[in-house]
Amino acid sequence: MLAEDSTLLREGLVRLLAEEGHEVLAAVGDAVALLREVESRPPDIVVVDIRMPPTHTNEGLRAALEIRERRPGIGVLVLSQHIERNYATQLLTSSAERVGYLLKDRVAQVEEFLDALDRIHAGGAAIDPEVVRQLLIRTTHTDPLARLTPRERSVLETLAQGYTNAAIAQKLHISRSAVEKNLNAVFDKLELARTTGYNRRILAVLRYLES
């Protein structure tokens, strides 16, 4: 399901998703209509703009959080024109499973947009690289994040975007063992508990970045 008040973007997404083999159950222009449609026929994934009518502030975000609370099995991909740090951390720290946050510019990069949907549908996360970068910049003045090496920081940034160890290795052109070694160092330096499953590690990282 899509919730986007821009008719042009909404219809463009409908056509794109249909061409890629996705079924769009509903495409609406406000958060109230989205919640109504979700209740009547729950989708696999909801794509929603943060700023929706009538106030164009955070109606879309509030709808996304409500959907995640009432129907945690539904994936949620939030779109934003600009980086909304508070909104991003509020959404991402609610859970790191079946969740995504992308800048609208990323939608124009079709492969990345579709890859984000696939990762969310598979139970993972998809976080815009620029959002992660801004969150990291915001906290570089605090320890222990400042103690990370450049390589550890790169691994952390890629991890926080929702990628698996294998994908991190491919994107950074390093071995999987190097990824694991750097991740262990990151979590030790951030004093984060070791957990199994990359989604829970992403959640721990994002919660740290929020602090």
Image: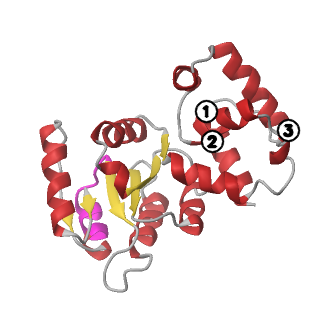
Structural distance between the alpha carbons of marks 1 and 3: 18 Å
Locate residue 205, reporting x and y percent. Answer: 69, 45
Indicate left or right for 35 with 17 as reference.
right
- Asked whether the residues under the numbered discs 1 and 2 touch, taking CB atoms below 8 Å apart as contact, a structural biologist would say yes
The residue that label 3 is drawn on is 189
Task: Tell me which segment is drawn in magenta.
Answer: 34-44
- Asked whether the residues under the numbered discs 1 and 3 touch, taking CB atoms below 8 Å apart as contact, a structural biologist would say no
Element on which disc 3 rests? helix
Locate residue 191, reporting x and y percent. Answer: 85, 42
> Magenta: predominant secondary structure element?
helix
The residue that label 2 is drawn on is 202
Q: Residue furthest front?
A: 150
Element on which disc 2 rests? helix
Is-magenta flag for residue 92? no
Numbered-mark total: 3
Is-magenta flag for residue 35? yes
